Image (spheres, grey):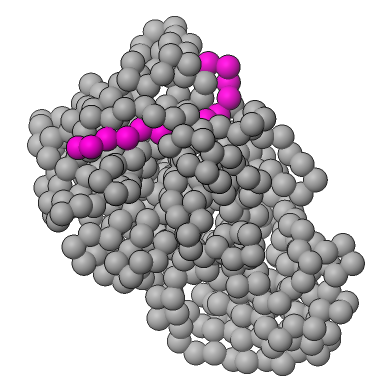
Amino acid sequence: MNATHKDLKKVIKIIEQLDGPRVKKDKWRLGLHLMPPVGWLNDPNGLCYFKGKYHVFFQYSPFDPKGGIKVWGHYTSPNLVDWTYKGTPLLADQAEDCHGVYSGSTFVEDDKAYIYYTGNVKRLGDFDYDYIGREANTILVETQDMKYFEPKQCIMTNKDYTEKISCHVRDPKVWKEGDTYYMVQGARTKEDRGQVLVFESKDKKKWKLINEITSEERFGYMWECPDLFKVDGITILSISPQGIERQEFEFWNVYQSGYYVIDGDFRSTYSLNNFCELDRGFDFYASQTFQDEKGRRILIGWMGLPDCEPEYHNPTVEKGWQHCLTIPRELHFKEGKLYQNPVKEIESLRKQCIINNIKGEEALSAYSLSEVIVTDINSEGGLSLIINEDVSLTFDTADETFTLEFLNATGAGRTKRIVRLKKLRSLRVFCDYSALEIFINDGQEVFATRYYPKQRKNSIKVTCCKATVAVWELGEMKY
Ligand code: FRU
């Protein structure tokens, strides 16, 4: 631990001690979603299961709820619901990462964890940061216990990428196949096209660029946070592209997050098929996956987006914090697409349940923290579920659409999001103190959104020809 590291750590501890109590008291502090102790949170990083524990790191700026220099915050859990905050192991304390410990991943092998991330450096002066004024260093940190972290090793710098690439290269994700290690990084070419760089290595330290993956037609100017993984035998490339034009019901957020199915070989000749958005809500970006000891492929996303002001202003900024992560979602590939469902462990938060049989219109009272499950749906005339007269979820049979809409200011400036949906078989809604996560048809579509209700008590109005609505009271996650 060098002197800068120690000093920075001390400063962060002081800020957390000073601002933490105020954040803890906030009525919008979340019960089902991980959020920062104070200040700003963005991407989930370094997700892994290691020596009996889940590790979730996150992009963290404790200094200001509106962002700033990024460090890595760290939560651990034995079961994905009881979390312990472990502080800030990776700080911007070297020449190679002095303007931010940016996003990255953890690769686990032989009792050791290898953390790869981007060391962000913005050169001082009147530079064009996209093309000449920025360094994107690939940094490796090894650890045997997630407590002591070995000295940082800078293993690649901009000159190790390719001539064709601008200064924007970041977010290494590492995995192994056979006896070879692979890494993908997100990039922006000098012609302003988003793409993914693929590297290989035999020793986890020396990396060679072996492929550049991009779409046939230009798809945005930058691809952030790539992840390449297999689910049920299918190879998926997920990315967070920037610069995509809004279409009928797609790509309405400022930046996107979604995936391609890769046909062929990502190392050589491949084709990318049909980019599909992972989430249809207002708040989802920069997701990452990992495989746990049970073999599950689990995804966590940042439940937030950059660059949304002034249209959207998150009112928790005034309370000293901003943003959260999604509930961990288990992935499967069915009927040509990824299905996402909350990990089973979340059910351990269930306390009591009321089951309602709906015929027509029914007003139900729900708990302040609740999970609402709608099944046995006869949606001949459609279905509507209204939460606290603030948010409506509507399935329109004629239009074959499902809409999430804010009916008043509790959306903090946002209005509606829509997805095409032929049939509504089930709906599962997690109502947190300032977030909703909505799973449709067992994870076929998901909407994640922040929501700022006036009170903590929930009421629900359901209108449908026939349906069964189970309303669960949930306990809070520990963190
Ligand atoms: C995505 C992102 C990453 C970067 C990190 C910086 O939200 O821009 O590309 O590494 O955030 O915080």
252 to 36, vertically: above or below: above
Q: Nearer the viewer, residue 147 or 225?
A: 225
Judge left or right: residue 158 versus residue 226: left
Task: Look at 89% across and 67% down and name the residue there.
Answer: 398
Residue 313 seen = no
Q: Who is closer to the viewer here, 120 or 408?
A: 120
| Left or right position of 15 against 167 | left
Q: How many numbered marks appear?
A: 0
Q: For the point 45% across and 87% down, which residue is it?
A: 351
User: Is 229 within the magenta?
Assistant: no
Q: Which region of the structure is painted magenta?
A: 190-203
| Residue 188 at x, y percent in the picture | 51, 25
Residue 317 percent location from the top left of the image: 49, 46
Residue lying farthest top?
126
In which quadrant of the rendered view does residue 60 lie?
Answer: top left
Image height of 329 relative to 128, above or below: below
Q: Can see residue 32?
A: yes
- Which residue is drawn at the image coordinates 74% and 78% (left, top)? 461
Residue 67 image offset from top left, x and y in percent: 43, 37
- As displayed, is residue 303 above or below residue 246? below
The N terminus sits in image quarter: top left
Q: In the image shown, does 275 or 240 lie closer to the viewer?
A: 275
In reply to whether residue 202 is colored magenta, the answer given is yes
Instruction: Please state, as top left, top right, bottom left or bottom right, where the C terminus lies in the image.
Output: bottom left
The residue positioned 44% from the left and 70% from the top of the image is 343
Residue 375 x/y as whole percent:
67, 83
Q: Is the residue 181 above or below the residue 473 in the image?
A: above
